[in-house]
Image: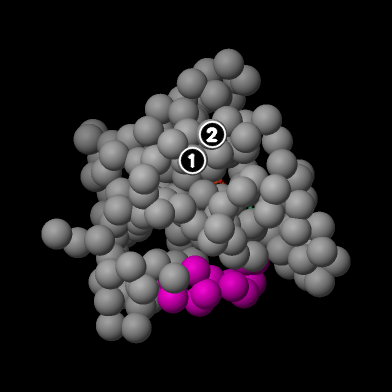
Amino acid sequence: MVFTVAIVGRPNVGKSTFFNRLLEQRKAIVDDVSGVTRDRQYGVTEWIGKSFNVIDTGGFVANTSDIFETEIRKQVKIAIEEANAIIFMVDVTTGITDLDQSVADLLRRSTKPVFLCVNKVDNSERMLEATEFYSLGFEKIFFVSSISGSGTGEILDAVAELI
Ligand code: GDP
Ligand code: MG
């Protein structure tokens, strides 16, 4: 079975940007499994000779706060079930939000490996701000800028180590 990593997190943190970057860099194929899982995008990527599936979640989350939390929690639970590891994405420009805390609570209860990925760390000033995310208590934390691609190699290394 192919190792699968799911990207979870609240809307607008940059999950899809990160997903596209992972796939584009590795010339991977995005498989649109429409009708089955319209709220998720699947792709296959390769890093240091290892192939794995990547799932981008949350494509169709409705834009009202109540549905938001229920939907996100649902997607995180599905991801925990179907993936071998989770990339939990947060956004340095907003800091830690209630929704981030809610996702973090679910992930802490899972036995799957979790990589906390602080996105939008586009410059050194944001790198300093990003340290607040250590307080979420995840051992493996990464700082990336999905727009520039910086930091993505470290995450891929960590994922590949599990395969
Ligand atoms: P999603 O809802 O989590 O899938 O988030 P998207 O990938 O759609 O991104 C939400 C917004 O954040 C978009 O306007 C992106 O261009 C922006 N964004 C994503 N990654 C970065 C980043 O590394 N730096 C900055 N400055 N903006 C980013
Ligand atoms: Mg998205």
Closest to the observer: 137 or 98? Answer: 137
Segment tinted magenta in the rendering = 144-157
- Residue at 30% of width from left, 49% of height from top? 83
- Tell me the crowding category of disc 1: few under 14, some 14 to 19, or many 20 or more residues within 10 angstroms, Cα based: some
The image quadrant of residue 127 is bottom right
Quarter in which the N terminus is drawn: bottom left
Q: Which residue is mark 2?
A: 105
* Secondary structure of residue under mark 1: helix
Q: Residue 133's spot in the image, x, y percent? A: 69, 51
Camera-side residue of 56 and 132 = 132
Q: Report which residue position mark 1 lands on.
A: 108
The amino acid type, in three-letter code, at marker 2 is Asp
Number of on-image labels: 2
- SS for callout 2: helix
| 89 to 96, vertically: above or below | below
Q: Can you say whether 91 is above or below 130 in the image? A: above
| Residue 4 placement (x, y as % from top left) | 29, 56
Label of residue 41 in the image: none
